[in-house]
Image (spheres, helix red, strand yellow):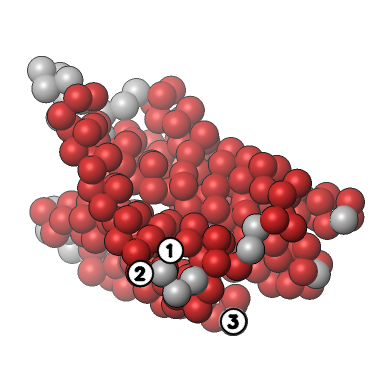
Amino acid sequence: MENTFWTALGASSLAALVTCAGIYVIRHFERWGRNNSIYFICFAAGVLISVSFLHIIPKAFSMNPNAPIYLFAGYLSLHLFNRFINAFVCDKSSDEHYGLGLIPMFGIGFHSFIDGFVYSITFTVSVFTGLLAATGMVLHEFPEGIITYLLLLRAGFSERMSLFLAFAAAALTTPAGMLISHPYISRINEPFLGALLSFSAGALVYVGATHLLPQSEAEHKKYSLFALGAGVLVALIIVFSKA
């Protein structure tokens, strides 16, 4: 049990470091990032929607017969959270677009937190199973850090606040989820994990389809469709690497 703890912690920490690497890289090419952030948005939409429908939702449905309810709850919760942010948090006299950064940040953060659960569970099954899962999950961490940081910048947050929020939501949540879940891993049954995965999928579908895709359609960039297709391709690689 102790060995699985350290291997799971190492894998989840590696995922956090890869996310930080993405944030670090894009910070040093900020002007380029701002000018081309719509391509990352299209890429993110392709990844999040495809991974949700091709892997997370089918997996959750196989683990919990009530997964459709949690899927709907995840989607509806993000919608209500968005309404709350726009109505009570965003200062209408300053910047109405903060919600466009906070909503994806919340969805990505919750998904990364659940990733930490997955590390705990898969490495408890076996190191080999954990490594297979980690290969697929780490693959998307680098663009995830870039996407989170750029979305916060586009929403009007300062560079320092965007850096802090991106680190907290996209990077720190993965090892945090692993550390929190590991002591109770024997008590987490399959239906409960299926419910969490389904809720996460609903949140990610909302982020991709309701927030990211409309932004990509509003800005008619030349290669936006190509970026969307690249995101779908990466999602297929992630899914098949976990198969």
Give the SS element for disc 3.
loop
Residue 68 is labelled as 2
Q: Which residue is mark 1?
A: 198
Give the SS element for disc 1.
helix
Q: Amino acid at mark 3?
A: Ala
Residue closest to the eye, 167 or 62: 62
Q: Which image quarter holds the C terminus?
A: bottom right
Do the CB atoms of the residues marked 2 and 1 lie less than 8 Å apart? Answer: yes
Q: Is residue 110 left or right of residue 91?
A: right
Q: What's the residue at 43%, 23% (across, down)?
A: 160
Q: Residue 113: x percent and y percent?
A: 55, 47
Residue 243 is labelled as 3
| Quadrant position of residue 120 | bottom right
Q: Residue 115: x percent and y percent?
A: 57, 55
Q: What's the residue at 70%, 56% (across, down)?
A: 187
Q: Which image quarter holds the N terminus?
A: bottom right
Q: Is residue 44 visible?
A: no
